[in-house]
Amino acid sequence: LVTKKKVLVTGSAGFIATHLSRELRDRGFQVRTYDIVHGQDLRDLVRVIGAVHGVDTVFHLAAIADLNRSRVDPIETMEINVEGTWNVAYACWKAGAKLFYASTCCVYGNQERHPVDENALPRPAEIYACSKLAGEYVIQGFHHTYGLPYNIMRFATIYGEGTRPALGTHIFFGQALRREPITVHGDGQQTRTLTHVDDLVAGIVALYDSERLNEVWNLTTEEEVSALGMARDIRSLVGSLSEIVFVPQRVGQTFRESISAEKMRREIGWEAKVKWKEGLERMKWWYLMDGQVEITYQMPE
């Protein structure tokens, strides 16, 4: 009999982890889950050690990922994103498990040269990015000291079916469908490499299958879309008459997210396939069919 590989996905109730867990199960993995919504706290080292015991690989996606929440509560952000990652790394080392860490392209901050590759010096501009970069250093420290096998995956801006309500695409859909003003930070010229969650999951699995370890990887499309372009595209897609209004710029804003995926393309043979407007169409139908406006918001009378 072929023994199915056991893996652990932290943050398993979250947007990306839900898609990843489903894909891993479809591929025959035994997927163990860990999430705060089930009372499983990353700050509980004993519990983390128990969860990691017996698995081949940990996909560590759990984090405080909301930029506003990170700014409001930097202590909890550091406890979960840094101390929690330390606990996961320690547990992986003790269990002999590989650690695939979900970091973020936000660690690059505002760079002068574009597109930004994995060799660029990180310049994080806000608490969330700082905490994720600190998590990277924790993992690399465990690797250099104890030989922990790892991969650091820097995700771009992810969207798609099941996206978190705090993300811009979700907010813009809600505002457009309720015919409310669509609120865009600053002048709306800041860009994001909006990567569909299906592409991201395919990239994670391709990296795992490659058996490459102990490196940093950008997992992203290379298609840039401005915040104003996002708002206009969503408004047009749903046939909304909403006005686009500009609100004060967000603290710690990255003004251009232009990230190179050349390493993943060259070394792993993966690249994002879902174009922005195709992914947006998919997300529209999920948003409407899943009742997101009614579930997430109070509908106007």
Image: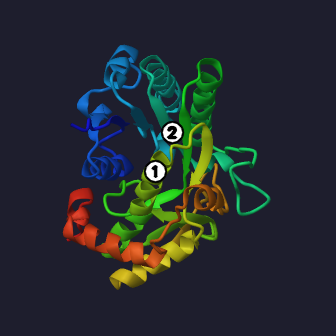
Q: Quick one: label 2 or label 1, which is nearer the N terminus?
A: 2
Outermost residue, top side = 46
Q: Please, what secondary structure does the residue beneath circle 1 have?
A: helix
Label 2 is placed on what type of residue? Ser
Q: Is residue 167 at all visible to an observer of this figure?
A: no
Classify the position of the C terminus by image quarter: bottom left
Name the spot of residue 56 as percent of width and height, x first: 38, 31
Identify whether 92 is placed above or below 118.
Answer: above
Q: Residue at x 47, y 28 (%)?
A: 76
Pointer 2 residue: 70
Q: Please, what secondary structure does the residue beneath circle 2 have?
A: helix
Label 1 is placed on what type of residue? Ile
Q: Residue 39 sits in which quadrant?
A: top left
Q: Which of 18/99 is in front? A: 99
Pointer 1 residue: 204
Would residue 265 be found to the left or right of residue 231 on screen?
Answer: right
Q: Residue 215 sits in which quadrant?
A: top right
Q: Which of 294/54 is in front? A: 54
